[in-house]
Amino acid sequence: MKRTHKNGELRIENVNEHVDLIGWVAKKRNFGQLVFIDLRDRWGICQLVFGEQFADRLKEVKNEYLLSVSGTVCKRQAANPDLKTGEIEVKVDDFSIINTAKTTPIIIADETDALEDTRLQYRYLDLRRPVMQQKLLMRHQITKSMREYLDNHDFVEIETPMLGKSTPEGARDYLVPSRVHPGSFYALPQSPQLYKQLLMISGFERYYQFARCFRDEDLRADRQTDFTQVDIETSFLSQDEIIDFTEEMLVKLMKDVKGIDVPRPFLRLTYKEAMNRFGSDKPDNRFGMELQELTPIFTDSQFQVFKNCIESNGSIKGIVVNDFAHITRKEIDKWTELAKKNGAKGLVTLKAKDGTLTGSAAKFLSEKEINDLYSQLNLKENDVLFIVSDKWNKTCNALGALRNGIASELGLKHKDEFSYLWVVDFPMFDWSEEEQRWVACHHPFTQPKEEDIPLLDTDLGSVRSNAYDIILNGYELGGGSLRIYDNELQTKIFELLGLSDEDIRTKFGFFVDAFQYGTPPHGGLAFGLDRIAMILTESDSIRDDIAVPKNANAKCPMSKAPTPVDNKQLKDLHIQIIKD
């Protein structure tokens, strides 16, 4: 099993060289006296030419057989421009079969007709497909680039525990029962948040980790139960300094991995501005259709829907979709349902036709209101105006979802275009209607803005935090904050979140204790590595960029995990299964 070259590296310069190759049979074509085989390995494909002396031995060779071949590099009569090795072929002198293969249940090629669950069931075969290998190789390039930057800027890579303490962090914990402590459980980390802050107290000043994290939550295309987080923490740096080095790292990453020069500084939006303009705290600014504030136009409206909104201090906003008036009643109903799904009570749809507005709500608008809409929004023939009126956050969220949905349908989101931006000045607290209490918008260790600290006693809804999210193409790549380093302020935040002294001691005792020993000002952020890989490989799902992912039902079709375990294991762990 000698190998002198990789299958994807031979070029016209190698003609007349004797080579030894190893690889899988990607395709076999029989032309009578000659047989052609495409031999595939991680580096590419090389065409092999077998003479008639090999006819009998080749009869048994099928796709995915593993071969060792030796031969001479020759110039191809007709070059294949689709292959990097398309100008050459190897005339085989001898070959051997290293191993045989059954007929595969999926096509091993860039294009396959297999359903996703079949691909995941036979993931080891799915990952032979060149397109899948390229995704994982690019993921490796991403981690290599980020590590290089961090290593060259005095960051230290430190591992934190996988078995830790259950603490409230926004999602359900995965719990691990303790055999030696009956009735007690470890929790798999949702993030290394507490540990990396403790490392700042320890004096390391600059830490990073490619950390495995676990959250028991419903899955979607950009979310997995277990995922990788690029975790970073620093001491003595301001928010601007953290944002600055993060941009430097991402600019390097884009150049290393995609060969793209990304301009700096990145656009920076406050949370309020992002919501008002894009209807999202993770805005996609690759296309227009920004939200427009229409409340002043309808101050004296007689349209009852708008009138009620004005009287309750709500917000009326709209988006304009150019040349969209061809949409049917059925399509309008579809967009209305999307708006309702995202919190709106309804959706007003108006079409610009013959210098006026048409639609079921048009008859309720005054001539002045119609003229003002034309003037403010610069409406053109066949434009469509969608309007939502409700509480400010509901109006923003509904129109933001509508904006994204329409942009996807119109093909305005180009996967080969990359637009970074920051969202800053997030609210410190959110009001939970379900729990009827204030909850942390990010996490309870986020530092409030200095000028807003007095509002902790009077107006929690107006308190802003020193928190920041980095956004790419409408996806939150990561986020972070400056952390509270004053013990009294941290205790106060815990209390405002409804944690009793006993809760604080039980859940965060070791953490609060550490704050009494000279805690430095510190802050950091964390990136979702899987999400970065998904966007840069131009995939539709992070499952394509994870070696062995779970499906939408949080199962691994290949290993069948999670599975029941035998009674002895349960007994050792002091667990009894109670069926409903």
Image (tube, grey):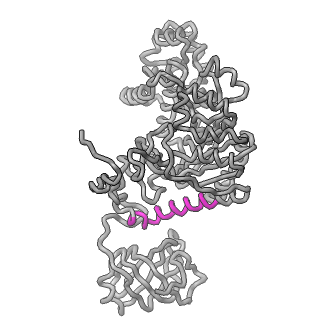
Residue 115 shows in the view: no
Taking the magenta stretch, the answer to whether it contains residue 130 is yes
Question: In the image, what residue occupies the spot 55% across and 79% down?
Answer: 10
Question: In the image, what residue occupies the spot 64% across and 17% down?
Answer: 458
Question: In the image, what residue occupies the spot 72% across and 28% down?
Answer: 450
**Bounds of the magenta segment:** 124-145
Taking the magenta stretch, the answer to whether it contains residue 282 is no
Whether 94 is drawn above or below 305: the answer is: below
Residue 344 shows in the view: yes
Q: Residue 152: where, in percent of width, then height?
A: 72, 59
Q: Residue 418: where, in percent of width, then height?
A: 60, 47
Overall secondary structure of the magenta section: helix
The residue closer to the viewer here, 151 or 520, is 520
Q: Quadrant of residue 218?
A: top left
Q: Is residue 462 left or right of residue 348?
A: right
Q: Is residue 199 left or right of residue 567?
A: right
Q: Quadrant of residue 61?
A: bottom left
The quadrant in which the C terminus is found is top left
Q: Residue 495: where, in percent of width, then height?
A: 57, 26
Whether 531 is drawn above or below 45: the answer is: above
